[in-house]
Amino acid sequence: MVIRSIRLIKLLGCCLLSGASTAQQLPSLEELLQQKTSVDPARIEVSTSARYQQNAGQSPQLTYLVTDEEIRRFGLRTLGEILSLLPGLYVSTDSSFGYLTARGIGRPGDYNSRLLFLVDGSRVNDNIYDAGIIGGDFFIDTQLIDRVEYSPGSGSALYGNNAFLGVVNIITKRGNQLQGAQLALAGDNQHQNALSLSYGLRDDSGHEGWLALSQSQRRHIAFPAIDAPQQLWLQQAQNDDNTGKIAGSYRYRRLHLQLAAVDRIREEPVLLESNSAITGITRDENRNYFLALQHGLSLSEKLEMFSHLSSNSFYFRSLTPFLSAPQQSNFYDFVVRGKWTNLDLRFSYQPNASSHLLFGVDAQKDHHQSYQLSIQNVMPLLEASSDNNRAGLYLQHDWQLLPAHRLISGFRYDYTAQNVREFSPKVGWVWQSSAGQSLKLSYGTAFRAPNEYEQETNRFFQVSVPASELIRTLEANWQRQLASDWALSATLYHSELENMITSTFGQSAVLQFYNDRAVTATGLETTATKRWLQGTQLQMSATVQRARYNSDKLDLTNAPQRLLKLDLSQPLWRDDLQLNWRLFAASARQSVQGELPGFARHDMLLSWQGNKDVSLVFGVKNLFNQRYVDVPLATGLLLRQPGRSAELTLRWNFFQ
């Protein structure tokens, strides 16, 4: 769907006139439920770090949050933009896929497989690459997100595979938060436009849900390669990205049914020969979905059972042109398919106020895993197909030793039909010295098994399959809530990594995988938050981190050693109009192309909440057009990162 700028402007004018003419009324019960409240961050309920609901201040591990209000104020349009607000995370892109570096670790060509991604607790990493999608093709649009929880550090003791550097849990909104119909429009001067329509409801009997449809398009995408030839720039009008989505949620009491599907087509001109003007179009197709059912049941006053079942599908096809003969082209046809089912059954037992036991089992049945590389309509070049069974048993005990002291211990054992056997223990201690101050110490291990693509590629070329990556992390966290409404935190960590899986180009010019040298990663993450009575909000984080090989002390690539992030929101002459400023600064980074210089970029946006039905955000991201490059791919290409863009976002609620 093409969204013309002139139509967006006309529709925006109609929406603003409609919102301005709405008469003021007393709030209904549903409107009161949708109103935001000012809450102490330590009292916000989170579920990621412990796998059950508890106050953030009581969780055994620090959990960072981004709320729906921050998403709206700063005009965040992708999950990658949301995650870039959080301490220790660094995001780069190749214009098609977003890459995430966490705690100084982000390997070239890694599809974010060292982080576990959840949607309302449902695992959404695929079963081929174990990839975590953070771009515009993520399942859930940002206006449907209530909050994003990020629990950094080793998480395999509860979650198993991929919870290597942390767990990201995207919590969607409830029906009452999306009550009625909502239209969301977004556009910028870089030909990126999006349209979303949702409808939500909640009735007095407890039934609630929402359904959302969206279409987005990126046109005339700039080529990121710094040495892109002029012949390609002449084809920029054909550099397109089109994504359609459907998502829905239904809840009744403790039953939750959820679905999401994405259909994406990405077309990009490429040069068929380095010394000629002959070009072609690469076409990538993605079709992914998941359907999840969750249910909670109280078996007694002390025992609760939680069950989860989900069905998932992943499809990717890439058609890459090449010259098969002079003036004659053909296509490399690469097709990847995956289908799998996840089952989770866990029990929460609390015999008394000082003890809480969590135990459970989860399993994944990989019904289909295959990929095939061929010359279209000619011959297959590479083909692999398999299936797999995975299961994990976990146990965690939270014990209140003394009024101010808690001990958390647990373990998990993972088994797969492909000969993965991993035991992941974890132990933690929480000292709540006062109502506003806590100290947390933890030690845990985690693993990442080689994914299907890594295994089968090596087998095809008769290269040994790499062993599972292992990490051991010792972490200390201090949190303090001051009487002056300042909230402070500091986290110090030390990690030892073994068997890190790294890619290299073999003699066949196809990526192959091996276990690299041992790595040590250390770092300090600090945050400070302040809220003033007049509505001003300030959030800051500063990170110092370093990951390097033990043998030669060389730094890992793709990871800045220092990060500074600052978000400031200031009401102007009226409470419903806010100026939002964001600073993101990163130090120099090592790459296969040498050291890349550091940079600082600024975003400046105005947000207006005219009434409960209409909100508008206009601003400029990368205000001073800071130019910087990264090397996120295994090919080692220097790629430009996004420059300045002027963006406009409208949300309009109607038919409530």
Image (cartoon, grey):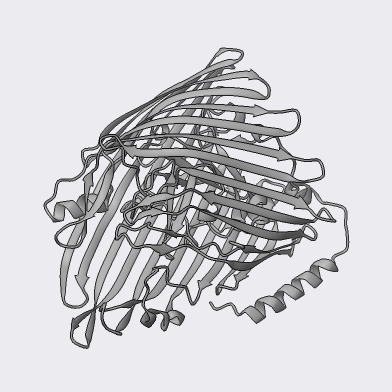
Q: Position of residue 292 (x, y in %)?
A: 47, 49
| Quadrant of res 381 | bottom left
Q: Residue at the location (46% across, 81% down)?
A: 237
Q: Is residue 44 above or below residue 2?
A: above
Which quadrant holds the C terminus?
Answer: bottom right
Give 291 or 83, whichever is nearer the viewer.
83
**Can residue 342 be seen by looking at this rendering?**
yes
Q: Position of residue 18 (x, y in %)?
A: 80, 70
Q: Viewed as shown, does residue 505 lie left or right of 547?
A: left
Give 200 or 222, whichever is nearer the viewer.
222
Q: Position of residue 172 (x, y in %)?
A: 58, 50
Which residue is outermost to the left? Answer: 462
Q: Viewed as shown, does residue 598 lie left or right of 301?
A: left
Q: Residue at the location (67% across, 38% down)?
A: 529
Q: Residue at the location (22% across, 66% down)?
A: 373
Which residue is outermost to the bottom? Answer: 327
| Quadrant of res 469 | top left
**Can residue 354 be seen by looking at this rendering?**
no
Q: Residue at the location (73% across, 49% down)?
A: 34
Q: Position of residue 503 (x, y in %)?
A: 25, 52
